[in-house]
Amino acid sequence: MFTRRSALLRELCLFALFAGTAGLVEEELYQGPTDGLPYFMSEPTVIKTTENDTVVLPCFVENLGDSRVQWWRGERLLADSSGEAPSFVVERVRMGPDNGLEVAAIIADDAGEYECRVERPSPWEPIVQKHSIQVLYNPTVSLSPPGPVMDVRIGDEVSIMCDAFAFPTPTVSWSHMGNLPEDSSSLSGVRSSRLIFKATSRRLAGLYTCTAQNGVGGPVSATVRLRILHPPEVTVEEERVHATPGLRAELICIVTAEPTAKVVWTRGKHPLPQTSRIIRKVNGDRYSLVFHRVLSDDLTSYTCTATNNLGQDQRTLMLTGVAREAVIKAERMSDENDDDSVKLIWEAESYTPIINYKLEFRRTSGPGGASNWTEVVIPADGQSALVHSKSFMLRGLSPGTRYEAAVHSRNAYGWSLPSQVLAFSTNGGQPNADDAQATDNEHIKSSESNSEEDSKSSEAVVGIIAGEDEVVATDEVEEVVEKAAIQSSQPRLHWTQVELTADHTSSASTASAISSLLLLTIVMTTVSSS
């Protein structure tokens, strides 16, 4: 009997112990109403706020009684309802009358999880409710490598890292003066972006801006100035500067270099000293040599040399008294029946009177294709103005045919450079851009001469001059010679030396060219004798 009662009592104790343990487990999982025990009336909360605001995290507890409420953040105790000072004190954080946690003057570091913990009487475990604060703040942007300037050599790879910190996560973009390099790529992470490209050209230098935005406030940017280190590059606006003694003149070099180049002006092999009459000026990338009053000895060539630790470059400029290149145009005859003539008009700038002009022209279409160049030396009108103008009539041209022409001007200092080649046509023909592109410019340029000896040499080969400002291109030589002899009581048929420019591959074209040259010479000498 005793044994049976002892076994029953042992079973009742085990049952009570099991029931108590089960109740503790159930209470940890379920934090709702329990007879006589504290439980939460509030719900877990996520509060989104911005910096400098104040938030209150709720912790409403029913049946609190003598139980204690604590607020924790990780392993740090922030507040305790018992009045005991927490081990970690934050002046901006305090517990309110309803056990809520008030956080004032919010900063970005306040973002995270907070726990409201209620200590219950033994043997019950504490109950915990979690809340969180999300601080929405404007991005802060930083670049790597740091610093306002980044230096790379031309041809090197450029790599710029942009880190953007914000909540919510920002989007990051790059810009460079409106456009990024064509071969650039950007590698984006959660809060960063890396811009990568190759510095293939000095034009890629300049400001690179990383911009981050997340909808909180406006976009935020960080900028770095990329310097692409390269040797100097020297260019000029005008290689030949027209000048005359007594007037002011200026030679200009444009120098691009990184780092900045040292620029030296030389005349011949010797550096040019600065005087009160000849001074050097610098305006950005423009380096000038200014002659306040040009002397005759100043009319020569000068070299602008730029040097930095990566290399050197130079250009030579000419201060010259020769005329500027002429500007030429053509006028067709208004008479539809006059389809073998074209009037050429040009203007040239020269401080000194122009002595004569050299006109070069050729056919670019028609039988046999393009012809060789024909030269005509034309007397000037002796104008004393800065701008000299001249008109000249080409007659006896082939109807409906394309031609091109260029003109040089000669003053006391020699021959100018040729004008731009002009494409024109007689009535019934149309200028062709392809013809103009195929112009034998080297032939024209090779005929220029700037020295006095070259000028005399040119006079020796002058052969086609028309006294009435016109050239007659015709084959009727015998008839014209006979008429000239009859009209002149003492005809002086002087054979001027000429430069034969006919195509020797064709006997017909050769005869035509010779006839034209003879006729032109006869017209000149006949007019001069009358």
Image: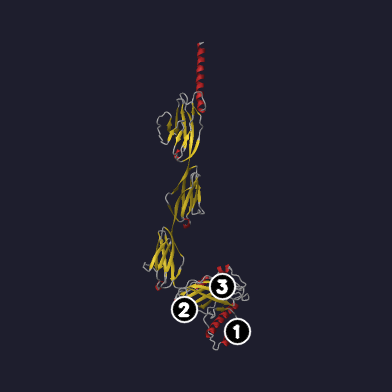
Q: Where is residue 241 shown, x and y percent of the image?
A: 45, 69
Residue at x 46% of width, y 55% of height: 206
Q: Which amino acid type is marked by label 1? A: Glu
Q: Residue furthest top?
A: 1
Q: Of callouts 1 and 2, which one flags the residue occurring earlier in the amino acid sequence? A: 2
Q: Mark 1 to mark 3: distance in Å?
A: 30 Å
Q: Of callouts 2 and 3, which one flags the residue occurring earlier in the amino acid sequence? A: 3
- The residue carrying pointer 2 sits among few (fewer than 14), some (14 to 19) or many (20 or more) residues within 10 Å by Cα, namely few
Q: Which amino acid type is marked by label 3? A: Ala
Q: Of callouts 1 and 3, which one flags the residue occurring earlier in the amino acid sequence? A: 3
Is 439 or 99 nearer to us in this picture? 99
Judging by the rendered image, the residue that carries numbered circle 2 is 456
* SS for dot 3: strand
Q: How many marks?
A: 3
Q: Where is residue 471 shown, x and y percent of the image?
A: 56, 78
Q: Where is residue 456 shown, x and y percent of the image?
A: 46, 78
Judging by the rendered image, the residue that carries numbered circle 1 is 479
Residue 370, compared with residue 480, is above or below; it is: above
351 on left or right of 369: left
Is 431 or 387 nearer to us in this picture? 387
Tell me the tag on residue 330: 3
Q: Mark 1 to mark 2: distance in Å?
A: 34 Å
* SS for dot 2: helix
Residue 463, compared with residue 231, is above or below; it is: below
Q: Is residue 198 visible?
A: yes
Q: Where is residue 388 shown, x and y percent of the image?
A: 49, 74
Q: Which amino acid type is marked by label 2? A: Lys
Q: Nearer the viewer, mark 2 or mark 3?
A: 3
Q: Is residue 165 visible?
A: no
